[in-house]
């Protein structure tokens, strides 16, 4: 079998779905997986193989990786695109909800990495592409668990990159900013639910308004297809970058975070997001 094989989580919508389509168009054998299998039906007409996988369930992940290996004998690219964000203040957000974000955004990708690395190591080639976020580089109010999980994913990706380089396995982080997908409207609903009626309501309302706009067509929000193209680039490059920040506004925010003091960055965030500090 000459075609390379990609396993993409979170393929039911948004970045994961677009990445699956684009990688299939590039000739990959693509397995697109998600927790809700019924939402994967539209991918099958594009020649993408689909099945249910829950990245918080070890049995689901182990059996899924085994299925791919049994069917095609290899996994060349793992794209950890499944993500979950339930925003709100640290004081108000349920602790179990915070744990769940780390299960989906950190422990799921790390467990899948554990499962695919032995196969990649045997073939002395592989790409692990972890979809982080601008939130993995900066901070913002009411995002402690989500941004915390993305910071953790970035740090662990750096460790993995060093560990796995000796086996010909590349680890790449992709950092989207605001993306036109259903994630924004879902996150807006969560922040209103968690913090929209208590002492943080003013911040929650301002953040929800900005998040809801991610489903629109504003130029500050990149289409999911733009992020998917970066994933394809990271998958096919002879020597991929360690990180790909997606979008000029994302790159500018990362640079400003490096240059500004914490207090100055706080003030800039308040101005640009409309979320008050006091």
Image (tube, rainbow, N blue to C red):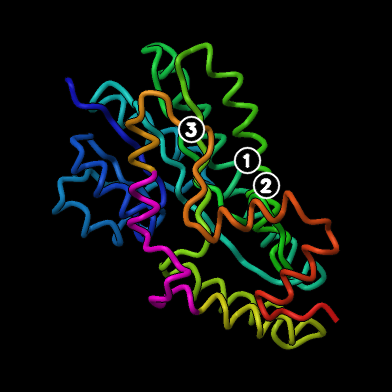
Q: Are marks 2 and 1 in contact (CB under 8 Å)?
A: yes
Percent position of residue 170, x then y: 47, 25
Q: Quadrant of residue 219?
A: bottom left
* Quadrant location, the C terminus: bottom right
Q: CA distance from mark 2 to mark 1?
A: 5 Å
Q: Which residue is mark 3?
A: 241
Disc 1 crowd rating (10 Å Cα; few below 14, some 14-19, many 20+) is: many
Residue drawn 69% across and 64% down?
143
Q: Which residues are magenta?
A: 213-230
Numbered mark located on residue 76 in the image: none
Percent position of residue 268, x then y: 74, 69
Disc 3 crowd rating (10 Å Cα; few below 14, some 14-19, many 20+) is: some
Q: CA distance from mark 1 to mark 3?
A: 14 Å
Q: Look at discs 1 and 3 and give the one toward the viewer.
A: 3
Q: Which residue is mark 1?
A: 154
* Quadrant location, the N terminus: top left
Of label 1 and label 3, which has the lower sequence position?
1
Q: Quadrant of residue 36?
A: bottom left
Q: Is residue 21 left or right of residue 199?
A: left
Disc 2 crowd rating (10 Å Cα; few below 14, some 14-19, many 20+) is: many
């Amino acid at each position: 079998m000459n075609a390379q094989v990609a396993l993409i989580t979170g393929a039911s919508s948004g970045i994961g779905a677009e990445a699956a389509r684009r990688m299939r168009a590039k000739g990959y054998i693509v397995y697109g997986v998600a927790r809700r299998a019924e939402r994967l039906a539209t991918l099958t007409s594009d020649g993408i193989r689909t099945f249910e996988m829950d990245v918080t369930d070890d049995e689901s992940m182990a059996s899924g990786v085994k299925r791919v290996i049994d069917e095609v004998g290899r996994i060349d690219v793992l794209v950890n695109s499944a993500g979950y964000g339930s925003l709100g203040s640290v004081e108000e957000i349920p602790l179990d909800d915070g744990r769940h974000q780390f299960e989906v955004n950190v422990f799921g990708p790390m467990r899948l990495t554990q499962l695919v690395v032995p196969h990649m190591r045997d073939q002395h080639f592989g790409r692990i592409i972890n979809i982080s976020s601008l939130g993995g580089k900066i901070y913002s109010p009411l995002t402690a668990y989500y941004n915390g999980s993305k910071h953790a994913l970035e740090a662990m990706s750096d460790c993995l990159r060093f560990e796995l380089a000796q086996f010909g396995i590349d680890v790449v982080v992709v950092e989207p900013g605001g993306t036109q997908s259903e994630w924004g409207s879902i996150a807006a609903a969560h922040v209103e639910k968690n913090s929209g009626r208590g002492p943080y309501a003013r911040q929650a309302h301002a953040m929800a308004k900005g998040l809801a706009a991610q489903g629109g067509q504003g130029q500050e929000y990149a289409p999911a297809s733009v992020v998917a193209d970066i994933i394809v680039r990271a998958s096919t490059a002879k020597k991929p970058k360690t990180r790909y920040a997606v979008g000029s506004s994302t790159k500018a925010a990362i640079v400003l975070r490096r240059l500004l003091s914490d207090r100055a960055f706080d003030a800039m965030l308040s101005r640009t997001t409309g979320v008050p500090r006091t």
